[in-house]
């Protein structure tokens, strides 16, 4: 799915004064591109994903998804959105939770991994009939990830999906996510705090400034995956991202491609 963000901004009605959460952001994302958003806490990354997911309305600007509006795209169940908290149904088992989107949008059959395949990938096969309350936070997060990926939606909006996971699990799942991305070609917008995670996943890393967030700069990676962060090229990319995150004086506007 092609994603066009044109001058989108969001100002919330704060309790006393308006709260600008996101400054105008313009970005063109190619179909099948993997974009990672990095930036300080509170800079509007979740707000940006919620705007695209049609959870909230932008204050200014337009969002165009394959020539269509976010509302219409959401109604066609073409958006897989994973929020920061797993929000599983406690009275349903792990397998039932993962199957839930399929039961809700039966009319939109798209090529997608099956719930069983995903549970296997996430190392959750032995917990298929367990209830979420009995699982650790990291395991619940993996269930939520499986539930998101089973929809076959052409646009994935992922809000820090690996935040609650230990380093080893994160490394394994990075490989699984890339495998699914290569197989199903979704456009992915992935929010993370982790520079290493971003350089393993992204075609482009979009670095945001502190609130109200805007684009400080974009780092493009063309190295084939799987990537090794100890190679010179990747280490150089990590330095570029760090430099953008640190440099608070001169905002650089990301140029749309
Ligand atoms: P991030 O995901 O980058 O940490 P968020 O997008 O969650 O940041 O939030 C950006 C800013 O907008 C924060 O200051 C947050 O408190 C504020 N904010 C987010 N949602 C709302 C809301 N519904 N009402 C008021 N303020 C909000
Ligand atoms: Mg957030």
Image: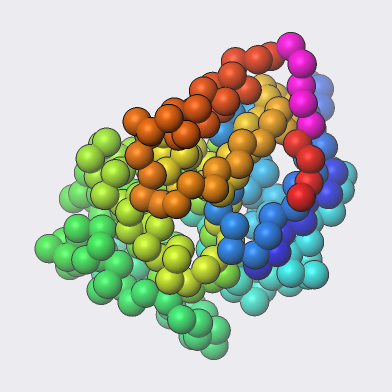
Outermost residue toward the left in this view: 126
Q: Main secondary structure of the magenta part?
A: loop
Question: What's the residue at 71%, 28% (across, down)?
Answer: 216
Q: Which residues are magenta?
A: 249-253
Question: What's the residue at 64%, 57% (across, down)?
Answer: 53
Viewer-side residue, 41 vs 196: 196
Residue 145 location (% of width, % of height): 38, 56
Q: Is residue 113 left or right of residue 16?
A: left
Viewer-side residue, 169 vs 61: 169
Residue 250 magenta-highlighted:
yes
One can see residue 101 in this view:
no
Residue 127 location (% of width, % of height): 16, 61
Q: Looking at the figure, which quarter contains the N terminus?
A: bottom right
Q: Is residue 17 left or right of residue 229?
A: right
Image quarter of residue 171 = top left
Question: What's the residue at 47%, 39% (across, down)?
Answer: 199
């Amino acid at each position: 799915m092609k994603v066009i963000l044109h001058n989108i901004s969001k100002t919330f009605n704060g309790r006393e004064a308006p709260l600008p959460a996101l400054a105008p952001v313009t970005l063109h994302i190619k179909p099948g591109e993997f974009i990672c958003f990095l930036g300080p806490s509170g800079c509007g990354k979740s707000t940006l994903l919620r705007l695209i997911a049609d959870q909230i309305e932008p204050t200014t600007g337009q969002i165009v998804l394959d020539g269509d509006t976010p509302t219409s795209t959401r109604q066609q169940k073409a958006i897989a959105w994973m929020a920061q908290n797993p929000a599983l149904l406690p009275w349903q088992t792990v397998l039932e939770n993962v199957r839930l989107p399929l039961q809700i949008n039966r009319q939109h059959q798209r090529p997608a991994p099956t719930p069983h395949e995903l549970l296997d990938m996430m190392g959750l096969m032995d917990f298929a009939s367990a209830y979420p309350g009995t699982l650790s936070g990291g395991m619940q997060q993996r269930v939520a990830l499986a539930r998101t990926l089973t929809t076959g939606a052409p646009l994935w909006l992922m809000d820090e999906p690996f935040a609650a996971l230990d380093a080893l699990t994160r490394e394994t799942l990075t490989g699984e996510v890339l495998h699914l991305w290569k197989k199903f070609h979704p456009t992915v917008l992935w929010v993370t705090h982790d520079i290493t995670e971003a350089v393993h996943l992204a075609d482009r890393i979009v670095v945001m400034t502190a609130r109200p967030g805007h684009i400080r700069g974009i780092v493009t990676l063309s190295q084939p995956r799987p990537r090794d962060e100890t190679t010179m090229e990747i280490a150089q990319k990590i330095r570029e991202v760090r430099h953008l995150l640190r440099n608070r004086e001169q905002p650089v506007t990301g140029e749309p491609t």
